[in-house]
Image (cartoon, grey):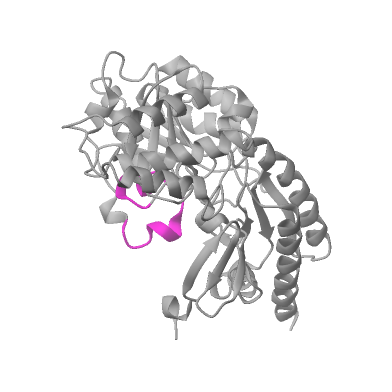
Amino acid sequence: MTGASALPMVARARGVMVVDTDGREYVDGCSGTICVNIGHGVPEVLEAISRQSQLVTFAHRSQFRNQPVEDLSAMVLSIAGPGYKEVVYNNSGSETMETALRLAMHHQAGTGRDIIVSQRPSYHGMTAGALAVSGHPPRRRNVDALLGGAAKLEQVSSSRDAEILPSLEDWMSVLERVDPARVAAVVLEPVGGAASGGAETEVRTLRGLREFCDSVGALLIADEVMTGFGRLGEWFGVSKSGIVADLLVTGKGLSGGYLPIGACIVGERVLPGVSAAEVSLGHTMSGNPLAAAAALAVLTYTRDHRLVSRAREVGAHLRRELTLIAQSVPLLRPPRGRGLLLGMGIEQDPVEFATTPLNRRIVDAALRNGLLVYPSGVDARTQSVMVCPPLTIRDREVEMLIARFTRAVSESFAAERV
């Protein structure tokens, strides 16, 4: 068997444990694809889904309002804090990034602003618009012809060999070169995931870009699909810097993987006097009551069980343990990231990486040892393994994760030495 047919068949999951049809148990060390924030099978969420399913599972936003969406919007805006006015719903992070880009271009209509500036490496989604602003060459391969449009893209890379992400000076160099008067929006990830493996944008850079956007009339779009709703030990990745993004893009942790949903949290200055939800149009399933009920239950559980502070505390412990593993393996870098979004960088010759990337080898070895982790990076320099368990992981399960990850790393680097 090859490809997907070689994967185990999942049977059930509860908490941080996933079981296949052969009865093998796996520690979910990456929360699925870094989305199962509160763990699998939480009774309160399943009950909320069941209750809503007995009432109504679909109502189109052009025909009805629905209570789960209204309650969810109130909670999301409360969590986001001052500076935001509206929530626009979609079915995924990719669709939500598309919405943010659409809203930015509507906001800038008639201004002559036609340039989107993002960073490389970065990843903002698989749909055409989201992928078009991503600095992720492997995922753009063979589809560039679909990604063109009237809006122009500029990307910023780090000028420092030791740093994965660009500095504020790197950003400003590009922003000044392309003409600030033409910049419609700046797009960034506060902490990277699929492309940069936990690399963190400096607070100084976030604040500097906020000041730039304010000074020239551009919008700041923060991609918080992977980081939002508690994973970093804060509700959002931009919280540490104290800034307010114009458009806050979320997904994944919003519903904890229970049902598809994404939400664009819209800043007060965007499209003043206009409903962003009406401008963005949306999709058939956008804002459906069943997904909203699930998301509301997930956020309520996150708040009531103090999982944001839990992510901060457990993340600090997990970082220490992963640092010890890295110290014993010359090619493994100390963890980067924040809270329970941690990435282990790997040093490997680019030629070898092109044929047998070590991060994939570690992921495969981890699977054999009953652990799920997530490969990330766009090249040899950024390749890494993400260790991002649910925020509900218990202390003994952290120790189980560490033991299995240690075995996977040992097997992978033993093969490398041979």
Residue extending farthest to the bottom is 1
Q: Is residue 409 left or right of residue 153?
A: right
The residue that appears at 40% across and 49% down in the rendered structure is: 125
Q: Is residue 90 above or below residue 181?
A: below
96 relative to 107, above or below: below
Which of the 4 quarters of the picture holds residue 352?
bottom right
**Tally of numbered discs:** 0
Of 316 and 71, nearer the camera is 71
Front residue of this view, candidates 304 and 409: 304
Q: Where residue 314 appears, x then y in whole percent?
A: 72, 46
Which quadrant holds residue 396?
A: bottom right
Q: Is residue 127 magenta?
A: yes
State the residue at coordinates (59%, 30%): 168
Residue 387: horizontal and vertical position, in percent? 64, 56
Toward the left, the furthest residue is 63
Residue 67 lies, in percent from the top left, at 32, 30
Query: Which residues lie in the magenta part?
Result: 126-143
Height in image: 231 above or below 379? Answer: above
Q: If the image is split into quadrants, where does the N terminus sit?
A: bottom left
- Quadrant housing the C terminus: bottom right
In this rendering, would 35 be left or right of 264?
Answer: right
Residue 192 visible, this angle: yes
| Residue sitting nearer the eye, 65 or 347 | 65
Q: x%, y% of residue 154?
A: 41, 39
Q: Is residue 247 on the magenta stretch? A: no
Q: Is residue 59 left or right of residue 218?
A: left
Residue at 50 percent of width and 66 percent of height: 12
Left or right: 115, with 209 as reference point: left
Is residue 265 visible to us here? no
